[in-house]
Image (cartoon, helix red, strand yellow):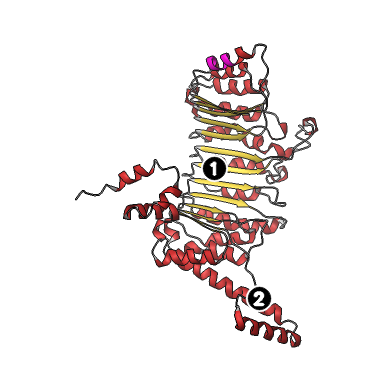
Amino acid sequence: MTSPLPFEIWWKILEYLPSDACVIRLRTVNRLFLEIARTLRYRNLSINKYDVQTEHLLRGISSISLGHHIQSLCIRPWAISSASHIDGPVGHILSAFDLVRSFFDSDYPGRKAKNLVQIQMHEQIQLVSQTTKDLENVREYTVDWDVNESSCVQLFTAFLILPNISPLGPTLTKLTVRVPTDRLVCLATLCLPALEELNIDLVTLSLPEEYIDECLHHVIVFINNHGQNLRSLSISSDDLSQNLNLSTFFRSLSISPFLRLHSFTLSIPYDGCHLPEKTNGADCLRSFLEQSRSLRHLKLSSYPRAPYPDLSLISTSPSKTPGGYWIQRALEAPDLANALTSLTSLELAIRPLLSDLTPSLAFICAVAHQLESLVLTDEFLTPDEVRRVVDALASAPACSSLVHLTISLQYLSTSILNLFASRLGHLESLKLTFSAVKASSHPDEKKREISVKCESVGSIFFSP
């Protein structure tokens, strides 16, 4: 009798199958295939509604011990119906009884509907909680919110505190949260000793600023409680948050250093409304960054502005749109570059509102000697602006450390490609996004020059 193949060899064989679905269909081949298929099927568990299929799935995970396969759990709370689901003669009798009783008690239908919602909510929370007791290997946990759909707010509370009452807490290394603002208070109660990555998407809608600050205080407490282990922090918000001001948030976070924070991402609307100048928002952000001296990756991005029919309609005067210069204001102090001595990866929205490149280029020039990757997003740069970027990178001593560059161009031409190849020939990858290709007097010559001039660059990705 031949000896069975080792588990590692089976995994190697499965790499040649076109998709995970093929592996799952082959689960009956042998016991190893079954275990591998279960791992692929259940490693990412998403619960975004509650119906008969969801109930069967959750009960099945508990009944046949599938919980150890789950490594990522995402829950998006749903709406709970107040309708009764009793069919047949019994259901008809109860409906008639309710109709008669409503004649004598006008408040009865409302009380019954509310009671049914509470009963169903309790049952659904209990089933989810019971299922999570078997999840011993979950590393990533997400509580999400679809603002465009109605959701039961009590479910957010129940699912946010799940790590405290289940095996999730000790194993979680990544937490992603997008919840109603008042539910953020639940974060302060969590204890996640292994947490390394935190992603928070703020959606405050039209809540008043004072109330938002009170809720964000609990987020600050949570971040500070886990600051010793936190490696990655991402904060994002969009224009759905009308009265959000992150100045106090970053001012509070800058009190204590984050010695192990390696990655930080901030994404807010292009006009900088969430870091207003009147509360020194950019200065507060810079103070936080200066306290994060171990940062290796920094990303400051802006959500796209509404399209303008004419770019000349966009104000470029700082006095008219000061908030739109939040990135430049945060980077303009030389002390920041001196503090971020470990920075190797930088991603910037280079010029929201067609703003002046000088502050951003000064920061890039100051850290260019240590950068391995640079990504410049937002507006398309003119050829002159591209040259200024290349000058800032090429003028740095030992700039050969830069191996990845991503940049957006107004148009692609052989002269621009020649510029990259001659000044930054040590690049391993170059990704260019452009809106047009500049015509050449000799079309055939253009293609030949592109292939010749850029042969020193490892790889080029074009995104027209």
Query: Which residue lies at the image location 30% right of the left edge and 44% below the top edge?
Result: 9
> Residue 193: which quarter of the image?
bottom left
Q: Main secondary structure of the magenta part?
A: helix
Label 1: how many Cα within 10 Å (few below 14, some 14–19, many 20+): many
Which kind of residue does numbered mark 2 sit on? Answer: Lys
Residue 427 picture location, percent across and down: 50, 23
Q: On residue 264, which mark appears?
A: 1
Q: Is residue 8 left or right of residue 202?
A: left
The residue pinned by badge 2 equals 114
- Front one among 202 and 216: 202
> Residue 418: which quarter of the image?
top right
Q: Is residue 452 magenta?
A: yes
Query: Which residue lies at the image location 53% right of the left edge and 68% below the top edge?
Result: 125
**Closer mark to the observer between disc 1 and disc 2:** 2
Element at label 1: strand
> Residue 81: which quarter of the image?
bottom right
Quadrant where the C terminus is found in the figure: top right
Q: Relative to 433, does residue 252 appear above or below in the rendering?
A: below
Instruction: Give the magenta-colored segment's residue range.
Output: 447-453
